Image (cartoon, grey):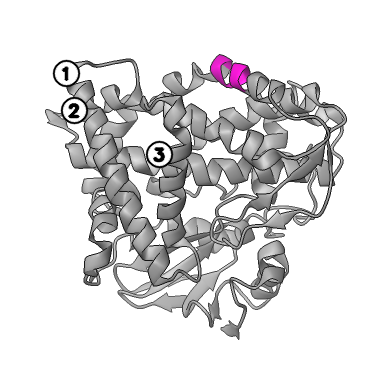
């Protein structure tokens, strides 16, 4: 197994990690990455296999003690389905799916279209940053509405979400942890007040449906509802914002033709955009028993890092994987993971992209990049810090 060194906060790496992924993949299905100190894989076959292999899971076998200053953050993590395995994960996901239904998500398409039009109406003339004016506002507004949080509070929710998600980034510090814990405490109390209000006055929103969700006589606890809402808000903010920003940047850089976003082609184009430059680059899994995968034996309790974006550029499943081909035949990719932890918000993210991007490029046919793209130093969730454009 080859050993490689690459700082995950190096600006050249953050701007283009795919060169490193190609180097890593060339040495076989697994490599040891010095900086995080982990066995990793950039192989599509290995990533797909491990995500579906129940010998690997998200929960650590021996959780480390939680420092006092991080208790508020991990009190939420303890009830998050992203961090759990069966049977707790199965129960929680089944209950949440009773509220977060595909029919409910599908019914949001007219709302997404109307919001996209409104945001475009508000865009300034000349040169401006599309990231805060469109890419951020669209998903955070929709998620806030879906859950039942007033739209006017979306900027505050965005601030709390950003502080919490920073915990998953490379190079986190004590200050990062303290901000995340403070945000988690305020976020939880904020949602607790709204949950209490919905218990006495239900509405047609996700909070009310989560309270009412029941399966086999079981319901979600208040702590589980809080953790679920924060998970959905964080994913809807961090992943969806970067998915939209990365997609717009790719379409502009690659000078995709208008027919790429035509009704007959838009779904295929969106899947290629998600494959080509997804927002989420890494999942971790722990081996729950000694397990051999593609010639490598993982001992019980060891971690493996699954590089999702690298798997999406594997030449095994895809011909010319480093090229963006909007009319590429669809194949399953790893942008939303796989297995029992497949992203719960994938249908909403896809609907946002399929609905909003054609409107954006139809309303602004002269849209073009206006300056160098700046990537945020947040490789785990890879996305832009600014998206300067001219109309």
The residue wearing badge 3 is 232
Tell me the crowding category of disc 1: few under 14, some 14 to 19, or many 20 or more residues within 10 angstroms, Cα based: few
Q: Magenta stretch: dominant SS? A: helix
Marked residue nearer the N-terminal end (2 or 3): 2
Q: Any magenta on residue 111? A: yes
Q: Quadrant of the N terminus?
A: bottom right
Q: How many angstroms separate mark 3 from mark 1 (CA)?
A: 23 Å
- Give the SS element for disc 2: helix
Tell me which segment is drawn in magenta. 110-115
Marks 2,1: beta carbons within 8 A: yes
Marks 3,1: beta carbons within 8 A: no
Q: Residue 20 location, x and y as percent?
A: 68, 72
The single residue placed furthest to the left in the displayed view is 217
The residue wearing badge 2 is 196
Numbered disc in front, either 3 or 1: 1
Q: Name the residue located 72 percent from the left edge and 59 percent from the top edge.
A: 315
Marked residue nearer the N-terminal end (3 or 1): 1
Q: Name the residue located 28 percent from the left edge and 23 percent from the top edge.
A: 209
Q: Can residue 147 be seen at all in this image of the molecule?
A: yes
Lateral position of residue 235 relative to residue 359, left or right: left
The residue wearing badge 1 is 200
Q: Residue 228 location, x and y as percent?
A: 31, 40
Numbered disc in front, either 2 or 3: 2
Q: Nearer the viewer, residue 75 or 87?
A: 75
Q: How many angstroms separate mark 2 from mark 1 (CA)?
A: 7 Å
Q: Name the residue located 43 percent from the left edge and 54 percent from the top edge.
A: 163
């Amino acid at each position: 197994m080859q050993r490689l060194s690459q700082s995950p906060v190096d600006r050249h790496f953050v701007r283009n990690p795919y060169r490193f992924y190609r180097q890593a993949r060339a040495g076989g299905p697994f490599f040891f990455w010095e900086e995080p100190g982990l066995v990793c894989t950039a192989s599509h076959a290995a990533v797909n296999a491990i995500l579906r292999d129940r010998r690997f899971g998200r929960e650590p076998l021996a959780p480390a003690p939680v420092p006092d200053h991080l208790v508020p953050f991990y009190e939420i993590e303890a009830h998050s389905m992203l961090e759990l395995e069966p049977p707790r994960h199965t129960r929680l996901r089944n209950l949440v799916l009773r509220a977060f239904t595909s029919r409910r998500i599908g019914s949001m398409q007219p709302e997404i279209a109307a919001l996209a039009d409104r945001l475009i109406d508000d865009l300034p003339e000349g040169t401006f940053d599309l990231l805060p004016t469109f890419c951020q506002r669209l998903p955070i507004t929709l998620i806030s509405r879906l859950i039942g949080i007033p739209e006017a509070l979306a900027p505050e929710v965005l601030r709390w979400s950003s502080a919490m998600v920073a915990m998953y980034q490379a190079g986190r510090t004590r200050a990062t942890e303290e901000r995340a814990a403070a945000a988690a405490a305020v976020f939880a109390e904020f949602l607790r007040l709204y949950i209490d209000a919905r218990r006495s006055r239900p509405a047609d929103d996700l909070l009310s449906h989560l309270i009412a969700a029941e399966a086999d006589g079981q319901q979600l606890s208040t702590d589980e509802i809080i953790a679920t809402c924060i998970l959905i808000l964080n994913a809807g903010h961090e992943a969806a914002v970067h998915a939209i920003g990365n997609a717009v940047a790719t379409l502009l850089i690659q000078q995709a033709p208008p027919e790429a976003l035509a009704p007959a082609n838009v779904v295929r184009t969106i899947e290629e955009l998600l494959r080509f430059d997804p927002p989420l680059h890494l999942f971790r899994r722990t081996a729950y028993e000694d397990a051999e995968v593609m010639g490598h034996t993982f001992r019980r309790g060891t971690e493996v890092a699954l590089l999702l974006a690298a798997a999406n550029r594997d030449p095994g499943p895809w011909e010319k994987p480093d090229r963006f081909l909007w009319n590429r035949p669809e194949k399953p990719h790893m942008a939303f993971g796989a297995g029992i932890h497949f992203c719960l918000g994938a249908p909403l993210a896809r609907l946002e992209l399929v609905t909003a991007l054609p409107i954006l490029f139809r309303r602004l046919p002269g849209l073009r990049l206006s300056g160098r793209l700046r990537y945020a130093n947040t490789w785990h969730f890879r996305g832009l810090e600014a998206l300067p454009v001219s109309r």
